[in-house]
Amino acid sequence: MNDRMLTASELVAAYATGELSPIEATQSALQAIEARDGECNAYCLVDADGALEQAKASEIRWRDGNPIGWLDGVPASIKDMFLTQGWPTVRGSKSIDPDQPWEVDSPVAARMREAGLVLLGKTTTPEIAWKGVTDSPLCGITRNPADPSKTAGGSSGGSAAAVAAGMGELSVGTDGGGSVRIPASFCGIVGLKPTHGRIPLYPASPFGPLSHAGPMARSVDDTALLLDVLSLPDHRDPAALAPPVASFREAVRRDVRGLIAAFSPTLGYVDVDPEVAAIVAEAVRALGDAGLHVEETDPGFADPKPAFDILWSSGAAKLLDTFPPGSEQRTDPGLRRVWELGRTWSASDYLDATAERAALGILMGEFHTRYDVLITPTVPIAAFEAGHDVPPGSGLSEWPEWTPFTYPFNMTQQPAISVPAGRTSAGLPVGLQIVGPRHSDDLVLAVAKLLEEVRPWAPA
């Protein structure tokens, strides 16, 4: 069996029969890192010895018939925004000293260890995860496995590239404005931003109510399995939701045929690349043919970017103000501009943006009394040339200008998932976004599973 590009679910099934072992799977993932990461630059830290030790322990559990759970022994990575005991968490920044005690696991890292996942290492991020592509003065440029001349997206681009290239079956990213869904779309994998608070966070993100953690995988089933692990409670996050009452791995089997989906190709204001628009529309037709009742309509809100900019830049400035003196000179120039902008807002400005965020949430809550889910493109374009914050020649100046489908749903805190919908004529992946009402992570996963069934996909 070729285990390199198996899903996590398939790996665990092979462990159970003895056809594969966690050691073999981990060795395969490490070989993939050796073969492909020089080109992709998905990892900023790889701990091969530690991973093999974890795999050996998992192999013993499987041999004795006592696996910890549904993902025991599955190779995985974690974005370098999450504290991980024994590993530096420098967040793509030259201003954070890696040579200090790293004694605390974030809730994400702790839950992954408790579930027996094999942690291979940490994935790249732009500095403090500030933008929709993945490059930083510290780690350089992360590239797309589908075409290394293109960006992997961001800010969880390292995680997306790792999963897409077979350098581990699973990863966990952060998403404050699309940072799980954008790279999932560009790299051709599944990326879920669950309901805010579904996955506990510690320390609290400076981006506050915008910030989510999210599972990334090559299948919807695997995404659901990892969400089951990550959704377990942690007392360090006062905003965390209660534990789910049912497993997400079972929720993906829900029959969603007959439910009502709104398809908004543009949200009423977005310019979408014609090829991307055609690919998404074809996938939506396939969902309709499979029994989902689809109506084309817009949710009815204007672009909330001005309010998002205030919330985003204020959070960035709050964090960066804690950095040591001289950090401005070491910081990504684009982030430095965001830092300066964030310092200009007053408390009244921030509260006005918060009120707009709340109004948008109320509007979407009412919208979902009529439509079970909303479907859009994930990103209006395919991946562009690596090393740029915006598509070259586009005339754009800021990353949110080319990610208008993602950040509104950070503001509303709704679950939103990107699922592969097809490829452009150049072979670049295109994602479709499914958004549900708050607390409907199970529904979003189930609709994503239906799309996966009618539009089968495998990363290149």
Image (cartoon, rainbow, N blue to C red):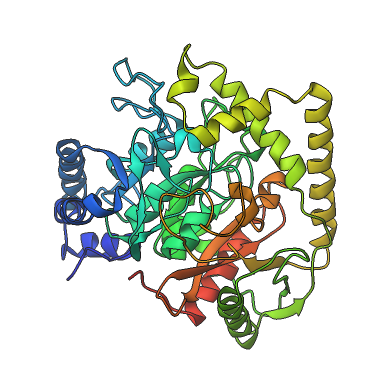
- Residue 379 image offset from top left, x and y in percent: 58, 62
Residue in the image at 15% along x and 43% along y? 56
Residue 402 relative to residue 173: left or right: right
Q: Quadrant of residue 200?
A: top right
Return the x and y of residue 228 as percentages of the image width and height. 48, 50
Q: From the viewer's perspective, is residue 164 above or below residue 105? A: below
Residue visible at 72% across and 35% down in the picture: 310
The one nearer the camera, 402 or 106, is 402
Residue found farthest to the bottom: 289
Instruction: Inspect this view and state whether residue 223 appears.
Output: yes
Q: Residue lying farthest top? A: 325
Could you tell me which residue is drawn at 62 percent across and 53 percent down? 396
User: Residue 137's spot in the image, x, y percent?
Assistant: 38, 34
What residue is shown at x 35% (from left), y 69% (from top)? 459
Q: Left of 357 or right of it: where is 36?
A: left
Residue 205 seen: no
Q: 447 or 152: nearer the eye?
A: 152
Q: Quadrant of the C terminus?
A: bottom left
Residue 100 vs 211, above or below: the answer is above
From the top left corner, tell me how far across and down residue 187 is, in percent. Answer: 42, 62
Along the horizontal axis of the image, is 3 left or right of 149? left
The quadrant of the picture occupied by the N terminus is bottom left
